[in-house]
Image (cartoon, rainbow, N blue to C red):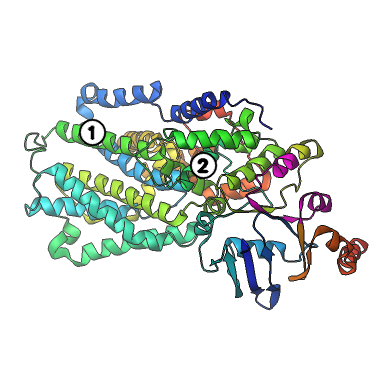
Amino acid sequence: MTAMTAKDRPVLAVRIAAYLQQRARWSPLEIAFWIFAFATIWLFPTKYLILKDAAILALFALSLDLILGYAGILSLGQAAFFGLAGYLAGLVAKYGIINEPITALICSGVVAAALGFITSFLVLRGSDLTRLMVTLGVSLMLGEVANRYSNITGGADGLQGVEIAPILGRFRFDLYGHNGYVYCLIVLFVCFVIARRIIYSPFGLSLRAIKENTLRASAIGVPVKWRLVAIYTVSAGFAGIAGGLLTQTTAFCSLDVFSLERSADLLLVLIIGGTGYLYGGLIGAVIYKLLQDWIANLTPQYWQFWIGLVLVAIVLVGRERIGGGNAALRAAVARLGGRMTSRPAALGGAAPDGS
Amino acid sequence: MPILETIGLEKRFGGIVAAHDVNLTVEKGARHALIGPNGAGKTTVINMLTGVLKPTTGRIMLEGRDITDVVPHQRVRLGMARTFQINQLFLDLTPLESIGLVVSERLGLGGEWWRLIGTKSAVTEEIVEIVERFRLTDIMHERAAILPYGKQRLLEIALAFACRPHLLLLDEPAAGVPEAERHELLATIEALPAEVTVLLIEHDMDLVFSFADRISVLVNGTLFADGAPEDVARDPRVKAVYLGEELDA
């Protein structure tokens, strides 16, 4: 019944293996992206503060993209992990529990991941709307806990008197923010490489399958719940590392790390940059920060109005870029009328944008 | 020992009885068809078998093991896979990726997050075998969304087959397939290996009588007749049900 002889089979197997692996290869565009990212250290020495903020926001958005773009979990509660790890990084430095910043950062991330693991069982029940509410609720609760125990957290005044030791005992956080920015960029890059590895693994493929069709995923033997728990935990860890970075580079932490705005900003960043191809959070974060900076210079009082206007325009013009932002709606559209936009498969190679 | 046995299977949705006292036995290696008019409860039964619905009462035994309380993805591991009446594909994935996913899940590699896909020869070799068996080789790089319907239908079955089930449930595999692509699909179903037991849920009588060596008839949620195709065809009650339905239509 087969059109091929037995001799052709190994050839085909090799071709298939090559094809599957080829998607995971770094494309020239990606390499250029990272070369430019590191070149900014020398190119824009006066912009370290905003670049550092963009790098932290990018990592934070990457954490949301992992669950939204690859597993279809909509969340308004990433700030819970960001905030928790932010306070932890501050407290361990303030009380000299862990002095070395990288160790402290990893510990904060691990604790945030643990919180992600525990809360995942609440979050992964129910639909998009339920998830939105539960994730939001968790971060509001944590914010209130931090407020209540102001003797530890400093309450509304924020956590004062944090002193961050030099990185690896050598690189001091300088006034110009040079070392802080390089530190953030390297952490972002390492996390990105891990995230990239994850999404091109069999585990990552199963996440895409779950996002595409949960019913079928479980019908072919994918343990859907555990896969979602796993990625939610990883995502929480990444969000935590972003929070830790913010505290370490500012030597300060305040209650607004838990705020709704912080989680909502992430959705905006992903709306700008797109979901499901990992670079969306990075590109979105840079654009968002630059836009914010530029508009705030023009009109310090009303900058949010213009940000809002830009967002409305982006959403109306480039609706398909939000893709994963409304998985339920997209699935419904796909069921009703097949794929509205069909993209040649060849283009899906380097940057599968999930639209 | 039969491969599948249901004992007093019943499903109620509120006051509606969708399935009542279904005692279905499927023998190992059989080509068994479950037929019945629209609304007879075929889909309810298959959903209970695969674990999508929980039966109100009754037990389901797979190879002598009680699987009534086993979650769907575990039933797959125990040797039962299904296809869907309406395609349930991963539209953004290519046949290669979808089949590769199923194979790696079955080999217990699906949780590996540190290894890139396409780097295990055990997986790629099995992908080759499956794309060839289901005649998907020339379109294996295309996204499932843009495949012709007949190919999508083949992929639908290929995904279930890649689970290496002992029992394969085919839910109306030929539904909606245009005449031109139908032959390829039926030939592929015919060519399924003999050691895989097939339970076919079907509406199309030509397909049922050409394929099945045993037929069970479900009417109003109850198993109505059960036997060899010739006997079922001769059964006056079955005729009445089908003729009655045709007269009503």
B6 relative position to A182: left or right:
right
Question: Which residues lie in the magenta part?
Answer: B185-213
B128 relative position to A35: left or right:
right
Residue in front for this viewpoint, A243 or A10: A10
Q: Where is residue A246 in the image (x, y as percent from the top left)?
A: 22, 44
Q: What residue did someone put label 1 on?
A: A186
Instruction: Determine the secondary structure under disc 2.
Output: helix
Decide: is A50 above or below A244. Answer: above
Query: What chain is tagged by disc 1?
Result: A
Decide if residue A353 is in sight here.
no
Residue in front for this viewpoint, A198 or A132: A198
The quadrant where residue B219 appears: bottom right
The mark that comes first in sequence, 1 or 2, is 1
**Quarter that holds the N terminus of chain A:** top right
Residue in front for this viewpoint, A234 or B98: B98
**Badge 2 density bin: few <14, some 14–19, many ≥20, Cα 10 Å:** many
